Each structure stands twice: as C-alpha cells, then as structure tokens.
Image: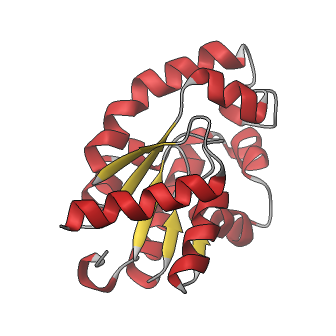
Amino acid sequence: MSPASGGPRLVLVGPMGVGKSTVGALLAQRLGVAYRDTDDDIVAAEGRAISEIFVDDGEERFRVLEKAAVRTALAEHEGVLALGGGAILDADTRALLTGHPVVYLSMDVEEATRRTGLNVARPLLAVNPRKQWRELMEARRHLYTEVARVVVPTDARTPEEVAEAVLDALEKDEA
C-alpha cells in the first residue's frame, strides 16, 4: 500500500452510511497511522454541521468547501483518509485521486436501511430516503468505481471484517 508521492496510505470512498469513518479509524489503528475525514475537516473549519452548511449556504457552496478540503488532505495527510460521499462528483477531485490507493466501500440499499434507517440527518435524503439513496447511487456508483483501485462490499460484515477485507484486497492488488 504505497501512497502516490507521499500522500495518504489509503483513501476510502463510498456512499453516506457505508462505514468509512468507522472502518477508516480501524484501518489507521491497524496500520499505525493517523485517520482523517474530510467531512470533519469541513465541520472544524466552518464551525457548523454539514447539514447546516447545506441549509444555510446550499449544496454548491458545500461542494466548493469539500473540494478544497480533499485537495488539502491529499497533499498533507499520510495516513488513512475518508472522503465525504459526494466528493467524487467533482472531476478535479477524481483526477487528484489518480495514483492513490483508493478503496470503494460499497453497500446496497437494504444494507443502508439496516445501518442508518435512512432517516438520520442526511441533507440529501430528506424526502423519500430509500428512493433518493437509490438515485444517488445510480448517479455515483460509476464514479466510485472509476477512482477505486479495489471495491470492498460491506454488506452483512462487521467493521472489523471490512477492515480486514480492505487490507486483503489492497495486498492482492499490489501483488
């Protein structure tokens, strides 16, 4: 798992609720490196929740903040990095991910419902969450796959099992 030019040891992408934060922290611990989440960076810099940014400033403003946060984290962070679910929507961000060990954590709508109930404070899922989640995934799945070196399904797996599967998949990818 060698990062591109000193960047993150690995980068996690995938939909909201897939477990990037939980799995990322586990992976960082196992690898003996720091964990960083670009959503946390945005919240810290703005002093308010992502849902507030969406409501107060709109999605377009949030995406500008997200793009800057990803660029900074890719340049500065050498541990495990998790990106927000929509970070891959930006073509420049996808280009920046080239050469990095990116892992797409996937799940289906049934798993998303089981994990989150699709009723938590997710700004993009405010109305008819199951339908909106499916539509988001139809629009994003190919982008996650485009940037990923490996895809690791998370359905019916514990965070520990997912972390182990990520490490196994990256090891096989490098072989």
Q: Is residue 100 in view from this perspective? A: yes
Q: Is residue 98 in view from this perspective? A: no
Quadrant location of residue 2?
bottom left
Measured as percent of width and height from the top left, residue 49 is found at 78, 54
| 112 and 92: which is toward the camera | 112
**Is 124 positioned to the left or the right of 65 in the image?**
right
Please tell me which residue is depicted at 48% across the width and 80% down the height of the picture.
79
The N terminus lies in which quarter of the figure? bottom left
**Is 31 positioned to the left or the right of 18 in the image?**
left
Please tell me which residue is depicted at 54% across the width and 19% down the height of the picture.
134
Residue found at the very far left of the displayed protein: 175
| 148 and 61: which is toward the camera | 148
The figure's colour scheme reads: secondary structure
| 61 and 118: which is toward the camera | 118
Please tell me which residue is depicted at 59% across the width and 49% down the height of the picture.
62
Measured as percent of width and height from the top left, residue 102 is found at 35, 59
In the rendered image, the vertical position of residue 156 relative to residue 52, given as above or below: above
Please tell me which residue is depicted at 48% across the width and 27% down the height of the picture.
137
Measured as percent of width and height from the top left, residue 67 is found at 46, 58
The C terminus lies in which quarter of the figure? bottom left
| 94 and 174: which is toward the camera | 174
**How many numbered callouts?**
0
**Is 165 positioned to the left or the right of 94 in the image?**
right
In the rendered image, the vertical position of residue 165 relative to residue 113, given as above or below: below
Measured as percent of width and height from the top left, residue 38 is found at 57, 64
